[in-house]
Image (tube, rainbow, N blue to C red):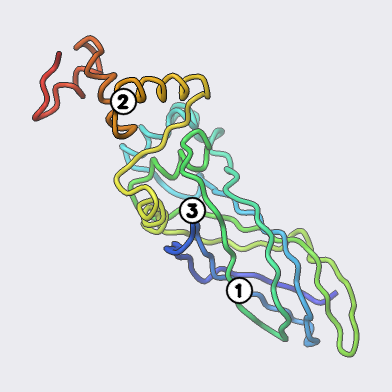
């Protein structure tokens, strides 16, 4: 069977995408010497948290995900980041293609919560490939892409942050149950509030001036009720 190998040469944030999207540049090599008419791939991306170190702030931010650092020898297990298809056009020998990966900033998703906790450096990724190749000179021959095809890549945290800031500049993201959202929307409508931020601020201003809410309602320029 002719051999396929893969490597990732870079990643960028897609500034023109409708939602948060990363574009990985893949290099595909076919060692058989015959033309490849098409390559239908399934690409799985995993984060391998055990392949990097963590500062104090990062460690504190990851306790809810991996538990206490004393247990990290057992709990730093790979996290699923994405699974996307890719159709590579025909080539002979070697080619490059863009792997487009839609992303989420939902902090209830383990991979997003992990990335949000990082101060900088790189994210260790493992890219796993499988699929079907259509090859052959003067005709078609169908052959599988072996399940053991993979490529390691270190994605800069700065690229992830650039992608997030393109769509959520200076903002966080929170997911709420539908009945809670309905109650917030009703409160916003009753009070004729112009935004969700104003809605939350209005509720905080009405809360007792104790605990964490007090720190928000007594921020510079604000007066606690």
Which of the two residues, 209 or 10, is positioned nearer the viewer here? 209
Residue neighbourhood size for the residue with mark 3, other residues' Cα within 10 Å, grouped as few (<14), some (14–19), many (≥20): some
Q: Earlier in the sequence, mark 1 or mark 2?
A: 1
The residue at 65%/56% (across/down) is 84
Asked if residue 114 is positioned above or below residue 224 in the image, the reply reads below
Q: Earlier in the sequence, mark 1 or mark 3?
A: 3
Which of the two residues, 21 or 160, is positioned nearer the viewer here? 21
Asked if residue 89 is positioned above or below residue 41 in the image, the reply reads below
Alpha carbons under labels 1 and 3: distance apart:
21 Å
Res 19 label: 3
Quarter-of-image position of residue 93 = bottom right
Which of the two residues, 213 or 160, is positioned nearer the viewer here? 213
The picture places residue 78, in percent across and down from the top left corner, at 58, 43
Q: Which one is in front in this view, the residue at disc 1 or the one at disc 2?
A: 2
Which of the two residues, 197 or 82, is positioned nearer the viewer here? 197
Residue neighbourhood size for the residue with mark 2, other residues' Cα within 10 Å, grouped as few (<14), some (14–19), many (≥20): some
Alpha carbons under labels 1 and 2: distance apart:
44 Å
Tag 2, which secondary structure? Answer: helix
Q: Is the C-beta separation of discs 3 and 2 under 8 Å?
A: no
Alpha carbons under labels 3 and 2: distance apart:
25 Å
The residue at 75%/67% (across/down) is 40
Asked if residue 24 is positioned above or below residue 170 in the image, the reply reads below
Q: Is residue 189 left or right of residue 35?
A: left
The residue at 77%/59% (across/down) is 147
- Quadrant for the N terminus, please: bottom right
Q: Earlier in the sequence, mark 3 or mark 2?
A: 3
Asked if residue 46 is positioned above or below residue 92 in the image, the reply reads above
Q: Which residue is mark 1?
A: 97
Q: Which residue is mark 2?
A: 200
């Amino acid at each position: 069977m002719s051999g396929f190998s893969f490597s990732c040469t870079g990643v960028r944030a897609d500034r023109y995408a409708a939602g948060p999207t990363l574009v990985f540049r893949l290099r595909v090599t076919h060692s058989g010497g015959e033309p490849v008419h098409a390559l239908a791939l399934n690409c799985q991306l995993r984060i391998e948290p055990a392949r990097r170190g963590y500062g104090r702030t990062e460690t504190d931010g990851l306790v809810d995900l991996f538990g206490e650092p004393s247990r990290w020898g057992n709990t730093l297990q790979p996290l699923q980041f994405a699974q996307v298809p890719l159709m590579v056009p025909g080539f002979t020998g070697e080619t490059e293609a863009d792997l487009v990966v839609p992303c989420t900033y939902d902090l209830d998703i383990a991979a997003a919560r992990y990335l949000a906790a990082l101060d900088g450096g790189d994210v260790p990724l493992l890219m796993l490939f499988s699929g079907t190749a259509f090859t052959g000179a003067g005709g078609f021959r169908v052959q599988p892409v072996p399940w053991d095809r993979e490529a390691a890549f270190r994605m800069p945290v700065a690229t992830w942050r650039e992608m997030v800031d393109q769509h959520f500049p200076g903002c966080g993201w929170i997911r709420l149950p539908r009945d809670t959202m309905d109650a917030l929307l009703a409160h916003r409508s009753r009070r004729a509030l112009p935004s969700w931020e104003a809605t939350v601020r209005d509720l905080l201003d009405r809360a007792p001036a104790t605990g964490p809410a007090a720190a928000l309602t007594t921020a510079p320029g604000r007066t606690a009720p």
